[in-house]
C-alpha cells in the first residue's frame, strides 16, 4: 500500500509577516515549520505504515527551502519525498495548487490513500485537499480524526459540528486530517542519519510533471487580495487595586467600564 501525504512549509504562526507591496506572506528569512495539520496527517500515515507495512511518500510544492520540512518528514519515518519546485508556480492560490499537486500525484502513481491536513495556518481555506480529490475524481472524507483500513476500505471518524460520525469509502481515496487529533512523533536518530546521507528529496519541475504553465502561478489564480490590515494589539499591563473592599471593587468596575469591557 502506498500513502501519499501532502505537506506545506509555513511561517510559524507567531512570525507571520505580510509584504506591504505584493500583499503576500513573507517566506524568506522567516522561521518556518511543517504546517501543523499536515504534521498530524503525516503522523496518521506513519501509524498506518506501522500497521500495514505501507510506503509513505511525502509531497510538497514550493521553493527549494521546503527541503527542510521534507527532510524532517523523512527523519520522522517517511520513505521518500518529492518537491514540485518551479518559478512559474510562484503566487499560486488554492486552485492552481490543487491542480499542480494532483498532476504530480499522478506522476508518482500507484497510490492507495492520499492524506492532507484539514487546512494551512497561513491561509486557512481548507480547499487544497478537496480540490485534489476533485481533479483525481476520488472519494474523500474530510476532517478525519481517526482512520482505519479494513478489507480494502477506509473507515474514518469525521468531526462534525455536533459530535463525530463514521464514514466509509473504497480505496483509493483522499482524507483530510483534523488538526490536533494526534501527537506527531519526533525524528529518529536513524532517520536523521538517513537524511544526512542525502538523496531523500526528489525535485521535479512543471516540465518534468507535464503541468500546463497557463494553469498555475499568480496570474492564473482567481483569488484577489483587495486589502490587508495589520492589527496592532494594545499593550498589556496588570493593575493592582488596594484598600477597602468596597473601594477596590469600585475602582475595578470603573476601570472595566473605561476600557469598554463592560457597560456602565
Image (spheres, rainbow, N blue to C red):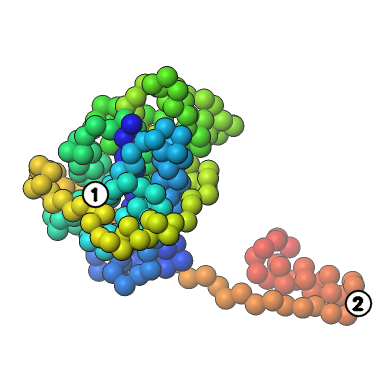
Residue 144 seen by the camera? yes
Residue at (13, 51) in percent of width and height: 205
Q: Residues within 10 Å of mark 1 (few under 14, many from 20)?
A: many
Q: Quadrant of residue 140?
A: top left
Of tags 1 and 2, the one toward the viewer is 1
- Quadrant showing the C terminus: bottom right
Labelled disc at residue 244: 2
Percent position (x, y) of residue 57?
30, 43
**Contact, mark 1 vs mark 2 (Cβ under 8 Å):** no
In the figure, 225 relative to 47: above or below?
below
**SS at circle 1:** strand
Mark 1 sits on what residue? 82
Residue 6 seen by the camera? no
Viewer-nearest residue: 130 or 66: 66
Q: Along the polypeptide, which appears first: circle 1 or circle 2?
A: 1
Residue at (89, 71) in percent of width and height: 246
Residue at (56, 30) in percent of width and height: 164
Viewer-nearest residue: 89 or 251: 89
Amino acid at each position: 500500500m502506498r500513502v501519499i501525504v501532502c505537506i506545506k512549509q509555513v511561517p510559524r504562526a507567531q512570525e507571520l509577516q505580510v509584504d506591504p507591496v505584493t500583499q503576500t506572506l513573507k517566506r524568506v528569512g522567516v522561521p518556518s515549520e511543517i504546517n501543523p495539520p499536515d504534521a498530524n496527517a503525516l503522523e496518521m500515515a506513519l501509524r498506518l505504515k506501522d500497521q500495514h507495512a505501507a510506503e509513505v511518500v511525502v509531497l510538497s510544492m514550493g521553493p527549494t527551502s521546503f527541503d527542510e520540512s521534507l527532510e524532517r518528514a523523512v527523519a520522522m519515518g517517511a520513505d521518500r519525498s518529492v518537491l514540485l519546485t518551479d518559478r512559474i508556480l510562484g503566487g499560486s492560490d488554492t486552485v492552481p495548487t490543487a491542480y499542480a499537486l494532483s498532476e504530480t500525484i499522478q506522476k508518482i502513481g500507484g497510490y492507495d490513500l492520499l492524506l492532507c491536513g484539514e487546512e494551512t495556518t497561513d491561509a486557512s481555506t481548507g480547499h487544497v485537499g478537496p480540490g485534489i480529490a476533485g481533479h483525481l475524481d476520488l472519494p474523500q472524507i474530510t476532517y478525519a480524526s481517526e482512520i482505519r483500513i479494513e478489507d480494502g476500505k477506509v473507515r474514518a471518524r469525521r468531526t462534525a459540528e455536533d459530535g463525530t460520525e463514521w464514514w466509509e469509502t473504497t480505496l483509493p481515496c483522499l482524507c483530510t486530517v483534523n488538526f490536533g487529533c494526534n501527537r506527531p512523533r519526533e525524528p529518529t536518530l536513524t532517520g536523521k542519519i538517513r537524511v544526512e546521507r542525502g538523496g531523500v528529496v526528489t525535485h521535479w519541475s512543471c516540465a518534468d510533471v507535464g503541468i500546463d504553465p497557463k494553469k498555475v502561478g499568480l496570474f492564473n489564480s482567481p483569488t484577489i487580495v483587495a486589502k490587508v490590515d495589520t492589527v496592532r494589539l494594545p499593550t498589556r499591563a496588570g493593575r493592582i487595586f488596594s484598600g477597602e473592599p468596597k473601594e477596590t471593587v469600585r475602582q475595578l468596575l470603573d476601570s472595566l467600564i473605561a476600557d469598554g469591557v463592560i457597560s456602565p
